[in-house]
Image: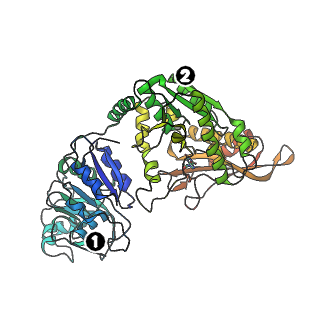
Amino acid sequence: MNTKDKVVVLDFGGQYSHLIVRRCRELGIYTELHPYDVPLKELKRGTQAEEGTGKIKGIILSGSPFSVHEPGSPKCSSEIVDLNVPILGICYGAQLIAYVKGGVVGEGKKSEFGRTELFFKDCALFDELTERGSEGGISSYRARGKAPPGLAGARAESVMGQSPTINVWMSHGDVIERLASADIIGYTMNSPVAAFRINGRIYGVQFHPEVHHTEKGEKILWNFLYKICGCERNWTIESFVRDKIEEIKSAVGADGRVICGLSGGIDSSTTALLVNKAIGVRLMCIFVDNGLLREGEKEAVINTFRNNFKMRLVFVDVKERFLERLRGVKDAEAKRMVIGELFINIFEEEAKKLGNVDFLAQGTIYPDRIESAGASSRNASRIKSHHNVAGLPEKLGLKLIEPIKDLYKDEVREVAKELGMPSQILNQHPFPGPGLAARIIGEVTEDKLRICREASHVVEEELKKSGWYGKVWQAFAMVGDDVATGVLGDARSLGRIVTIRVVESSEAMTADFVKLPYELLESMSKRITNEVKGVTWVTYAISSKPPATIEPC
Ligand code: XMP
């Protein structure tokens, strides 16, 4: 339970909900994402809490793909506006407040998408946004001394008067047409109520301040957090590390013992480092070599944690057991099941051997929790879930420690950097829980494993050499059972087909193949056919996600 005072973002399924949380955290305020239908009494309890005990200092209502008039559109309790806490509605969030407050939300004559000029009134939310130049949009009408067609009364006066303007990012079809109970603090050409304020406590903006394209969007959020909610800065990576170490120390006590399953990925590595800083040798890491690791991965993990960080680490070599259990298993999901179950069995055996353990440290991160709780949007797509040690804590009677459970991936990287994580782990591409098995189509055999590992290594090396590695999300080679004819020396021979996959992505929800230079693909292909025994053909995967996934299995 986090006892930091916070701002809560209610997620109505908008594409930028996570971004709002991240922006607020970047501005130094601890912020959480909650489903839109979180019980009102929970919010009430939070707003009434003492300062410094997890008090909710402000609530932000996110956007949504729905219209407030659509049957089944997501709606929080209308009493939310009566809670004694500042509220900021963004896009759909603003329309919802208008709807609850008796305003008129209509379909709008024109949708507004993209950069739009907003003219605004001085108020706490728009404090210290300076006026920009006068080219284009409303400013051009002002320069010509002529009101835009269709605008009359106060709006026309405002346009033609001295109201300052900024460019904001819009993405909406519905429009707030009227909101009698509010003070209108912003207009655009198509939105008569592009920003409003009610009692100096409730604000709504039709645009997206969380998106970088909104000029001064960060300052608008800053104004809401610091000026309107009265938040105090409580979220920096250094303070997170300091507080977390103290928290782990006090949770584990003077002689508690902890185990941690270390995969070498950024999440479990960061978790292990944090726990190690807190309790030193009372942490034992368990590193399982299931035979599905990347080239050089085993050595890198052992070297980093045992030799560099001087941490205690049990190395379990169970390659044979995994291969044995995977024999004859062709179906992708069946392979995942086998690997997940065996991993848990092995982990359990090792934990029992160690005996006298009280806690299990796990590298769960914030998006994992939100997704598995089904918490936020009903539209959120799910990535394949990591085979982790779910269920183990109860089985072994262990208490769970999840020190990075409130962090996003980029925040995990910052923590890892702060803790001195070597760049090889810090900057590596994500790697799936089932390891190379996710890249072997059909049965996992020793031969296919070798080909996949060696060919992937070539792909990574070539990308690193050419400066592409850090620019792409994931890159690897995959192999199946297909063979094709090649010429080796003077003889024709059959060999495997290897497919290279290099994708760019943001958080793996969608992905595009990377348009690598032909010369680079050519050198990868040459090296793979020359250096990896048994390969005659190399192809490049050019499918996007969707409909394909990133991993073939
Ligand atoms: P897909 O293949 O579903 O993968 O497009 C999306 C992202 O998730 C990774 N992935 C996994 N990660 N355990 C993991 O920890 C898994 O079982 C798993 N399957 C896929 C994949 O590498 C990509 O980054």
Q: Which of 29 and 53 is in front in this view?
A: 53
Amino acid marked by disc 1? Val
Residue highlighted by disc 2 = 307
Find disc 1 in the rendering and name its residue.
175
Q: Is residue 71 left or right of residue 385?
A: left
Q: In this view, does 415 lie to the left or right of 552?
A: left
The answer to which quarter of the image holds residue 52 is top left
Q: How far apart are marks 2 and 1 (CA)?
A: 61 Å
Percent position of residue 535, x then y: 75, 46
Q: Look at the numbered disc 1 and say if its residue's Cβ is closer than 8 Å to ligand 1.
A: no
**What residue do we see at 29% from left, 63% from top?**
93
Q: Is mark 2 on a helix, strand or loop?
A: helix
For image coordinates 55% across by 43% down, the residue present is 388
- Report if residue 91 is visible in the image: no
Residue at 55% over, 47% down: 386
What is the quadrant of the N terminus in the image? top left
